[in-house]
Each structure stands twice: as C-alpha cells, then as structure tokens.
Image: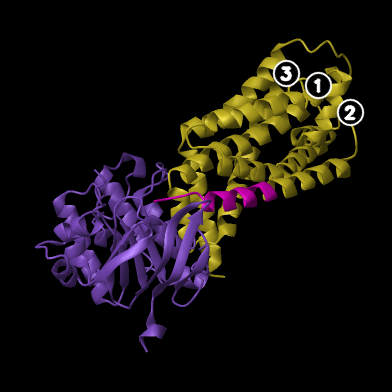
Amino acid sequence: MKTHAAVARLESATKTYGTVVALGGVSFELWRGEVLSLLGPNGAGKTTAIRLLLGLTEPSSGSAKLFGLAPRSRAARVRTGVMLQAGGVPATLRVAEHVELFSSYYENPMPVADTLAAAGLTGLEMRHFGELSGGQKQRVLFALAICGRPDLLFLDEPTVGLDPESRRAIWKQVRLLKAGGTSVLLTTHYLEEAEALSDRVLVIDGGSVLTEGTPAHIKEQAQSATLEDAFIKLTQREESF
Amino acid sequence: MSNMKLYWNETRFEFLKMLRMPVYSVSTVAYPLAFYIMFGLVLPTSRIKGAGMEQYLLGTYGAFAVISATVLSLGAGIAVERGLGWLAVKQASPMPPSAYLVAKTLVALLFSLIVLVILFGVGWFFGGVEMPLMNWLSAGGLLLLGSLPFTLLGIAIGMLAGPNSAGGIVNLIHLPLAFFSGLWLPIVMMPEKLQLFAHYLPYYHLGQIGLMGVGAHAQGTLSGHFGALTAFAVLFTGIILWAQRRNSERMYG
C-alpha cells in the first residue's frame, strides 16, 4: 500500500491566523524518490504548507506528518534536510565550520569535504560566510540541507539569485539525490526549474490546491506549451473590471 | 555519548562566532570597564567614606559586567538571527533545543569570566581594592552563578525584539535597570522609595550577591537573593515559551 510509504503528508491541513485563512484544507503526499514542486503565487499558502511540514507551526486542523511521525520529532528531523530563504546567518563562521556544525546534528553525515564538493564550495572552505557572494551563500545553505544524507529534502527557492551555471549544478545534485532515493519538496518561482526537475507539480492558490499532476498533464490540462503558461492560466484571478 | 560532539560543536562555534565579532567581544569588555573607571575610579567616591568602598564598587560593577556580557550580546544577536530567518533553519534542523540553550549559556559564562578577570585586575591595580584571595574567588564564583538567569533574559529579549530595533531596545532595558538597581551608584545613595522599588528588579539581586561576594555591606540574605533570581528565571522562561509560541503563529504567505 502506497499509504504507508508516504514520506511527507498533509491531511486536510488548515491554518488560520485570526480571521485570515492561509491554508484551507490542503492534502497531499510525497512519495519516496519523488520530486514534488509546490507552485503558487506569493501569498498562496506555499510557505505555510512548508512550515507545517517542518513543525515550525501547528495546523489549526488536520495533520502534518513526516515518515508517519510528528514533524517536530528528532526521529523525523534526522532524516530531513532543509533549505530555507534565510538571512542573519552567522557571518563570522567559516564555510567549513557551518557545514561541520550541521553535520554533527545528523547520525550519519557525509564527510564535510564531500558535502562541500557537492555544493560547489570546494576552495571556499576557509571563507567567512559574510564574505561570500549571494550565490555562494545560497550554496552554503544548500550544503547544510544535504550534509546529513537526508531521505527528505525541502528546497525553498533553492536557486534564487544563482547564475545559470550554478543553477544547473544544483539541479544536477537534486537529480543525483533523487536517484539515490531521496524525496524532494521544491518550491520555486522558476517554472522552468519545476518543469526540469519535478515528477509531479501541485499548484496552490488562495490556500487550496488548484490542480496536481505531472508537468505534462498540467500543460495538457491548461492547453499550454510550457508549464509557465499553464501556471499563469491556472492562477489568473478573475478580472473585475 | 554521540550527542557530546553536537553540544561541543554548538558551543565551540557559538564562541568563535562571538569572538570574531569585534563589536561584541571588545564592547563586552570595554563597556563595563569604562563605566567602572568613570564612576568607580575617577569620580571621587568620598561622599561615602569608610572601609570597603573600593570593594563595594567592585561588587556592583562586577554584577554590571556579567549582566552586560550576557544580556547585551544575546538579546541583539538572537533578534537578528530570528528576525531574518536563520533561527527557523536551526529549529527545522535536528539540533536539540537544549544544545542551543547550553551553548548560549556556556559562551555567556565564558565571556563573563573573561570580563570579570579584567575588571578585577583593574580594581586591584588601579582601584586600590585589597581583600583576601577568598573574597576574590567568592565574588567571581557567586557572580558567575548568579549570571545564569540573565541568559534567559537575553534570550527572551531576542525572541521579542525586532532585528533592526533590538540593539536599542536591549540598551533601553539594560541601562535603566542597572542604574535603578544600584549597580553604578551605591543603592544607599538613592531615595528610600527607589531603594524599595529596586527589590523588584533582577539586577538589584545580583548586585547584592556581588556585594556579599566581596564581603562589603549588603542588604538581605544570600539565599534570599538567589531565591529571587530563581523566580526571575522562571518568569523569563515563561516569557520565552510565550514568545516562541507567538513567533510560530506569525503569518507567512
């Protein structure tokens, strides 16, 4: 039964802030070795869905599970790697020190040198984080997400601000991880990226799921040549004038 | 224990992170020292003549120094890391929350120890403080022990203040508390009503503990002051848990 194998699962999850409904009953699963993209305009509820699955906030109703466990549990977290958009990263720690610290959070991490190589950071080990370019900082955050050999990887806008070459390098790593059985939950505004990497796409807007399926299925559904065209058609608000 | 390495790394890198920030590491030492030199050494303290004035000021400025080293760095540092998203990355990682707390506490203790050694050195060389070795040790030990609840105060401020305003907010809390608790000028020089009010301030209790450490005249009992600080530790913990809950309910898109 597939039901038992869900790596991540939201079940009728809602999240309200006062009277604002950020998420109005969303359900989806992520399977082993699958890359699932969560797409939606700003404010659609993507971040809320991710925060529920990471145990950073609790659902108002419904449930969020990783590996059938509470997302906050250490047993779930040691199998999970997370890359979020983050500022305030300690600027005076070196690249290798950041990776060494996060590696020690996990039970069976990769050697630091391997993590650095996979994230394209070889040669930058001794640099302070604060001295890095924007793209290099992104790559450090990616390194922290993969250092623990996670079974489940959250990537929130992983390639924002990256040059095309670095972006392709990250794609390559994501494909390698997927080939090794890692499941990936990706949020991105680059539809080309979603199309290139995803097995399945989930489009959410206004706090609920608009549609889901393979990129090909969604393009067909919206009668569009690219995923980007399909996305724009699907999420177009009704014009009131 | 496999977790030992995790705790060790968390603490080691927290220390290196702070040490490499001159804004913090220098000001932590320089700030209380400057106050001690200005008010404790340069200003004539002859208004209250008598035995032990030098010790007295070392006791209260010692309290000011360890609280500064703890509250100022934690408050502003955490506010920035939390407000800009880094704390969420740590929280979503498998790092046990206790490792975070232990690292912050040990590093604050270490910086407190460093600043105390320097302050005591200045007091001994330039401040004319003469007392038995036992008093130096008990003052240092009691001040370090009493500084522990202030780690929680620093974290609480960091969980509540915004990343841009934290520096100002921390000082707005820290400096008046220090003044009204008698850490700069002896509490006995204050109007009686203010002296009574000081009993409700955590800084006052550590000041009195510092005074007992150096063997100067103090109010109340040692156990009473530690009891009060324990109560404040519970209060600060409650604020942290409440703020943590509030922050997790902050709305995102």
Q: Nearer the viewer, residue B127 or B167?
A: B167
**Colour representing chain A:** purple
User: Which residue bears the numbered disc 2?
Assistant: B217
**Colour representing chain B:** yellow
Disc 1 marks which amino acid? Answer: Pro
Disc 2 marks which amino acid? Answer: His
Name the residue rendered at 17%, 72% in the picture: A217
Callout 3: chain: B
| N-term mark: 2 or 3 | 3
Image position of A104 (left or right of A173): right
User: Which residue bears the numbered disc 3?
Assistant: B40
Q: Which residues are magenta?
A: B238-253
Name the residue rendered at 38%, 79% in the picture: A6
- Marks 1/2 same chain: yes
Q: Secondary structure at mark 1?
A: loop
User: Which residue bears the numbered disc 1?
Assistant: B186
Q: Secondary structure at mark 2?
A: loop
Q: Is residue A226 above or below residue B216?
A: below
Name the residue rendered at 88%, 21% in the picture: B192
